[in-house]
Image (spheres, grey):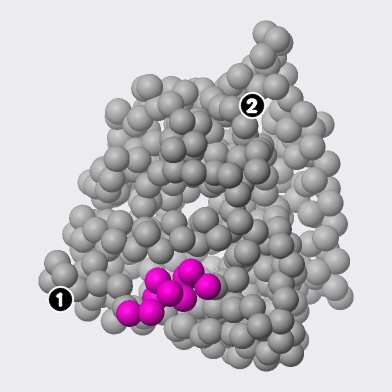
Amino acid sequence: MLTEKQLYKYADVLLWGLKTARTGKYKKNDIVQIRFNLPAVRLAEILNEKLLKMGINPVLRMNSTPVMERSYYDISNNRQLVFTPPGEEELYKKINGSIFLHAPESITHLSGVDPKKIGKAAVARKHLRDIIDKREEEGVFGWTLCMLPTEELAKHAGLTMKEYTNEIAAACFLNKESPVEEWQKVHSNAARIKKWLNGMNVKSFLIESENIDLEITPGEKRKWIGISGHNIPSFELFLSPDWRGTRGKYFADQPSYRSGNYVEKVRLEFKKGSAVKIEAKTGEEFVRKQLAMDKGANRIGEFSLTDRRFSKINRFMANTLFDENYGGIFGNCHIAVGSSYSDTFSGDPKKLTKEIKKNLGFNDSALHWDLVNTEKKRVTARLAGGEKATIYENGIFTV
């Protein structure tokens, strides 16, 4: 487990992330929710203390235990499955920040649950996420999250608890004298790359590796974002493309755990923006049902690249937060099927409406699932003037 000193440093990093992720400043009497799994209770206590000293009103919510969550899906009737507690929507309309402390005691307890039930519950809560997204666009909400080591995660990653804890500490700079200063350096270096990427007039990106031949269209009024405080750790730079311009083949060589299901070697083929062919070595039926969750679930909501110079993560961690930021030898790229991120809109986010998002090709879905490829690859930008430029190769941006 992380030491008390490391937990206090983790709390400082999370508060840095919370502040950095929001365009507007926090002020006294703002409301910040701390959502946590039971093994993360000590970090929740530390954050609660720090927020109170800042004059912030913390709202604490403990996630369901694995037994509670399994019972929910096994026992709930249709009305219970889509039930939203009274006051929940009111809270979402007033909340200013959210910190999620992910420390799962099980990542396989939902195995065997009908994916349609999981999808139905997710769709029923989508209106709450829409409220949060709008508040973020207005600059009155920010969020961040992190992960803490558990025996369950270590087991599925094939590591000891000590090894797993050390990986988290190293990735988040918790062994440094001032982790916040380390994150500020990464943030600054990433800003230089984002400025370079956003200075290009790109018609499409071509991603090529041994098993990938995929073309993605960034679309109008897009910008690259990332390393913005939202995720701790986060080393990825990404955008939400115009889903309608996606075509070709994508392959996720990195395994994935989702809703209790283990998925391995997912292959997707896109035509006219939608996945028309879906295959997986393990968990294919689950993948198919997830991508049929709603109309937008089989479309791309995100394209991401991680520079290995930033990320020292080189082990499979059995958790997307770390796995999507894999550095290794060749970095990684990943796509997310499902919902897009409206903060990759280059215009005034306050003016975004559902109609404008639709017209610009921002995808809408209750699903957002990152599928990671760690193969050696090249990413080529096809510029509006007809030129081509390699922007990413051998795990690093070429700037």
Look at the image and give the residue range highlighted in magenta. Answer: 86-94
Residue 201, position as x, y percentages in the image: 70, 22
Q: Name the residue carrying label 2.
A: 378
Q: Name the residue carrying label 1.
A: 75
> What is the C-alpha distance between the residues marked 1 and 2?
48 Å
Residue 231, position as x, y percentages in the image: 62, 61
Viewer-proximal residue among 1 and 185: 185
Viewer-proximal residue among 29 and 397: 29
Horizontally, is 57 left or right of 76 in the view?
right
Viewer-proximal residue among 187 and 384: 384
Q: Residue at x 50, y 31 (%)?
A: 360
Observer able to see residue 103 = no
Q: Of the residues shown, which amino acid type is indicated by label 1?
A: Ile
Residue 233, position as x, y percentages in the image: 66, 61
Q: Of the residues shown, which amino acid type is indicated by label 2?
A: Arg
Residue 397, position as x, y percentages in the image: 74, 35
The quadrant in which residue 64 appears is bottom left
Give the mark, 1 or 2, whose residue is nearer the N terminus.
1
Q: Which of marks 1 and 2 is in front?
A: 1
Q: Residue at x 58, y 44 (%)?
A: 351
